[in-house]
Amino acid sequence: MVKRERVLRMSVEQPMWRALAGYRVLTMLYAIGLFVYRHDKFVRPSVAIGYYVVLFVWTLATLPKVASAAHCTRRFLAADLTIALTGVLLTPVAASHARIVAGTPTLPSIWTAGAVLAFALKGGWRWAALASTPVAIANIVQRGSPSRATIHAVLLVWIASMAIGYVVEVARASERTLARALEIEAATRERERLARDIHDSVLQVLAMVQRRGAVIGGEAAELGRLAGEQEVALRTLVSGGLLPVSRVSEDTAAGAVVRAVEEPDDEPADGPVDLRTLLAPYAGARVSLAEPGAPVPLPRPAARELAAAVGAALDNVRRHAGAEARAWILVEDEPDEIVVTVRDDGPGIPEGRLAQAEGEGRLGVAQSIRGRLRDLGGSAELISVPGQGTEVELTVPKVSRDKAEKR
């Protein structure tokens, strides 16, 4: 049985919702207990009793609403905040003005903070600030004038709810990052397993067909050539992960879930691109590509120009070394620069031939290769020994020439 990797659903904010549910129940019981202890101090206890009946039923009936961000809807948040504000504004009706001035708690007491915290967990610190503002206004209105104790309590709820909202936003961002890392790890393990299976079966068969076709000749040779091309293409696909794939995370009721999506075509023109994805199409039956196992990022214009220079070098190999010549592309990711070497096993370039070609107006090497690298702030070195092939070394700095001059 094949063991497959999978990414489990998770949610680092779920304990916060459970804590909020417990907080709402405990503070509701606290507010009711406080009234029972001091019911004889109220001028209209019937108003308080009616409100506490509504508060008791509402708190218990809405416990499923504070189970997760998905269940906690905007309509519920608005109704919950209305219940809290109503209790605050009913306090002057149920209690005397003298007791309010003396600092008696409002009818919902600290239960009001639970309504504000629900906003913080649902929408972050901005929603917390939005919910804290009407609570602050209601507390000042029910007292008649601002006092030090009222301002202190209002600021405490305001700052605490915004801090919790910010923590929730950071937790969600960390959750998405962790989920993406786990998905990439699982995908990498699966790709390695598939690569091993393909290497042990399909690639070996294609390599054998290529060798036997070259020995037999005729139509078998053409079949062997096609098998070699498919071997290179399949090897590139399973070894490097060259296809541009991104993964995003989505928050659902059960937590963050990772899914694979295709990248849009309208990427920024100057954004980084993996050089390997541009060089992979050059690989074939007679062109081998050796590249690092990790992405080789370059600014998109620089990567395209470097790939075009590699294509020009391979065109020269086909044109001057013949269709049967073999070529090798080596990509090296150095700390400060990218080095791409194109080597062939052709007859080489006779001494003085390049200068003669430039004099005749043939500027393939001068413009298509050296000119491109010069514009990128890099260099192109050509080494050729008659009878031993030609080697072109293309070097591009990771920092563009303009940025280097500014530094």
Image (spheres, rainbow, N blue to C red):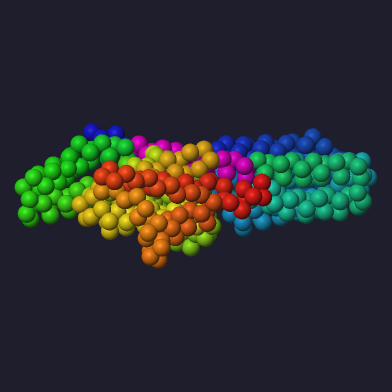
Residue 272 visible, this angle: no
Q: Quadrant of the N terminus?
A: top left
Q: Position of residue 184 (x, y in %)?
A: 42, 41
Q: Please indicate whether residue 179 sits to the left or right of residue 387 in the image.
A: right
Q: Nearer the viewer, residue 388 or 53?
A: 388
Q: Please indicate whether residue 122 sits to the left or right of residue 208 in the image.
A: right
Q: Position of residue 112 (x, y in %)?
A: 73, 45
Q: Nearer the viewer, residue 11 or 399?
A: 399
Q: Position of residue 302 (x, y in %)?
A: 49, 54
Q: Position of residue 305 (x, y in %)?
A: 45, 57
Residue 267 visible, this angle: yes
Q: Nearer the viewer, residue 1 or 394?
A: 394
Query: Which residue sits at x=27%, y=40%?
Result: 194
Residue interval drawn in magenta: 168-190
Residue 186 falls inside the magenta stretch: yes
Query: Main SS of the magenta segment?
Result: helix
Query: Which residue sits at x=29%, y=48%?
Result: 348
**Does 225 appear above or below 207?**
below
Residue 309 falls inside the magenta stretch: no
Query: Which residue sits at x=17%, y=40%?
Result: 204
